[in-house]
Image: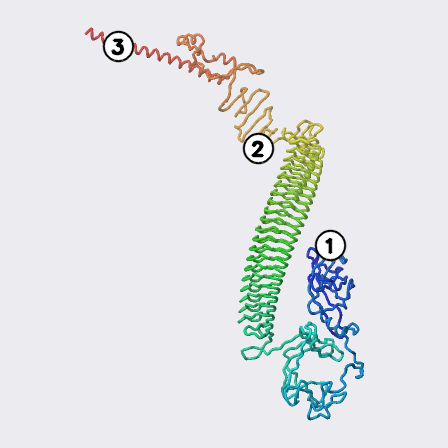
Amino acid sequence: MKKSFCLLLITAFSAVVLAQTPQRMSYQAVIRNSTNQLVTSHSVGIRISILQDSPEGASVYSETHTTTTNANGLATIEIGGGTPVSGNFDAINWSTGIYYIKTETDPDGGTSYSITGTSQLLSVPYALYSKQAKTADYNDLTNKPILFNGAFSSLTGKPTTLAGYGIMDGMSTAHVANGITSSLITNWNTAFSWGNHSLAGYAVYPSQTGNNGKYLKTNGTTASWSKLAVQGETGLPDEVLFEVKNKDGQTIFAVYDEGVRIFVNDQAKGAKGGFAVGGFGLAKQESQKYLYVDGDSIRAYVDTTSSKAAKGGFAVGGFGLSKGYTPKFLSMTPKNYFIGEGSGSKNTTGRFNSFVGFQSGLNNSTGRYNAFFGYQGGYNNTSGNSNLFLGYQSGFSNTTGSYNSFVGYKAGYANTTGALNTFIGSYSGTNNSSGYNNTFIGFYSGYLNTGGYENNFIGYRAGYSNSGGHNNIFMGTDAGYSNSSGNFNTFLGFQSGKSNTTASNNIFIGNQSGLKNLTGSSNVFLGNQAGENNESSVDNVFIGYLTSQNHTTGNNNIFIGSHAGGVGTSGDNNVFLGFWAGKGNVSGGGNIFLGYRSGEVNTTGYSNVFISTIAGYKNTTGYMNVLIGDQAGINNTTGYQNVIIGREAGLSNSTGHGNIMIGYQAGNAETGSDRLHIGQGSLIYGEIDNDMVRINGDFEVNNSSTFKVYKSTGRVGIGTAPTYKLDVAGDRIRLVNGTEWIAMRTDGGTGYLDLSFGAGSLVIQGSTTNENVIINPSMNKVGIRTWTPQYELDVNGSIRAIGSVYYGGSTTSANGTAYTKPDYVFGNEYSVMKINEVEDYLHLENHLPWVTSAEKEKRENGDATDMTRMAFETLETVENLQMQIIELNKKVTELSELIKTQETEIKVLKQIHE
């Protein structure tokens, strides 16, 4: 399988023509793998092909290389020095057509090459062709010239007379006799011209004395009589028009159709060879150099003390036949350095700027301390200061923004007023306009940012869509790619937080952590793909490999551990800590799972606490359970409201609820509900639904005889080992609540609500001696507020009974008669005694007919009086008397009416009698 990789070309083809001109070209490249990581200190395979005429043209030469990258991923080879595959590098005719270089690389060091690109070869390799022209084999030439073997007679077609060569006696009137011989032109005053040699127009006129044959000059005092012109013929870029060589035949100065070249021998000792332009004068000291070129530098010197309007400087410009604008290509003054056509051309008062590139800093007027490098870099800058723009149209739209550093193709292209930004990488911060204090590093990093500020984006397309978001940190390929207005986010890792749009205050660290988060805020996702599918949930903490990978909308969760909460989508308020803890949770909320695989398959169960290895492992929908201990409640599935604590406790419970199991293997066989198991083998057992607790063993307090309960005998001892069912060692039993207490005593003392035993009586005593109840079983008497009851019930105070009061009957059966109010007296069936009948009864019985006689009271109660019966009998008596009063009232009324009638009759009789 072929692997993707990247090459970053950083060189440099070179062919230096020296004594032994190398027939090779140097080539360097930076190798990156499919994840854009440098391939460092690693063997790589490279195949180089030279294509002719077009990027898809025929290969004229191909070779392979195996080399090792350095610590910076840089691979270096020499083209022409590899293992040939096809063609001959030395046989390439560089003068015919255009050539391209095609590069194929295998980053694994083999021959499974991946095509990375094709680029055109420029003029440098043609120096090889120039060298080839110097050393061409005569036998390979067509239209071979005739070789001169040193003998004039060997020439063919030669003239037989001097006239045949256009040379005749008398051509120079002053020196005809001495002008020409058959083999040599001699004498210092021999001239070749179209007329008199004293007139202008001579083409060649050596006239200076000394060094005859080596110098071609004028006479040194008058102007040159003619120009020396050299014109090319073929128009080829490497055609030599004029060439100067040293004694070894090496080219020192050469004029080609495409330019002028000066070659410096930087191997010479002492003063290096070079090229200099300087002033001269009569003084003995060395003249001032204005332009100096040697093997280690190119220097230009200007006079900075000039007082004239035009300051000293160095400039290169264009020229032509037309009038108007004359472009400047190079302008260097003490205040500004402008290199490139139109660079800094509108500068007015701007100072200390360096603009390099076509139209770089074109519109700068007052901006200072700027450095623009590249085609139209800082093109629109007017007054922005202290900016560094490096790359094609980097900082193109900047006008007033200052203290920016833009490096890369169209880096910071749209920035206008934004300041204090650092954009490094092609298209980094391209659309930023007013954002400030941003740092974008990487291809397309912060590409759409406009007004966002104080952001740090590092990596390919990191923060690509950010427009107004601020105070974000995105590091890694596509980290925070879709963020538009989210603030205070930190995304570190490949595609971490890639889909985040408006959410803020998130921390995502790890490969694809928080990958799909859209609007969820205040989350912390740490680990490979942690919270990968989270969309809108907030206030979550996910730490670990694939932790809560599928979580989408749940809030306020804390998941720590590989795969913890891995399947969950919407659960809230959960805490999962441990490898695979709560891995299967879907929507359950309010759970706490701590430990390896604790609550692993929980789906919708809520409000559970599972602590320890595999605790609550199989729980699915069970809720409100507390399972603590290795494998505690491991088989619980739907059971709820259980408390299971201890290793393997509640092992068999699956659906039971309301259980309490504490201890190693406590209740491990229990399958029911509402049960209490404490200790292995259920030392303490209870049935919560039946309000029953059982202790299956002896029980004591403080490891002494203070309190003991013996299972085998069923005895309880307090202060002693029991010999009876309940043994209490001491003189009293007391229950205390603050200042109030209940005591059972043997000394008959006083106290608050004191139950004492003395003289055969049980005493219940209050705070004073008059607040007591005494029960004397031997005398069958009960006294209230008296210490010496005289009757079965002796009450020193009021008595109130609520309910029925009975009389008669026996003590062994419920056959007494209930006392009732005598309202029946007013009923129609009740026979009210007449007064005379009452009178007769009184004479006979000596007591009212409705009241128990004293004799009967004595007989039944002794000297006591049944007050309850007396009260009811008295009420019945009153009701009878009331009935008699009513009857008597009727009689009185009748008699009154009769008397009135009689008085009327008597009055009438009196009147008649009178």
Q: Position of residue 751 (x, y in %)?
A: 56, 31
Q: For this view, does 887 lie left or right of residue 676?
A: left
- Depth order, front residue of 766/151: 151
Q: Position of residue 587 (x, y in %)?
A: 62, 40
Three-letter amino acid code at the position of disc 3: Glu
Q: Residues within 10 Å of mark 3 (few under 14, many from 20)?
A: few
Residue 861 visible from this viewpoint? no
> Which numbered dot is residue 625?
none
| Vertical side of 744 occupied by 3: above or below | below
Q: Earlier in the sequence, mark 3 or mark 2?
A: 2
Give the Cα distance between marks 2 and 1.
93 Å
> Which numbered dot is residue 903?
3
| Vertical side of 173 occupied by 890: above or below | above
| Vertical side of 217 occupied by 484: above or below | above
Residue at coordinates 53% horizontally, 69% vertically from top-left? Answer: 365
Q: Position of residue 320 (x, y in %)?
A: 58, 74
Q: Position of residue 797 (x, y in %)?
A: 49, 24
Q: Earlier in the sequence, mark 3 or mark 1?
A: 1
- Depth order, front residue of 713/864: 713
Residue at coordinates 68% horizontally, 44% vertically from top-left? Answer: 580
> Which numbered dot is residue 741?
2
Give the Cα distance between marks 3 and 2.
83 Å
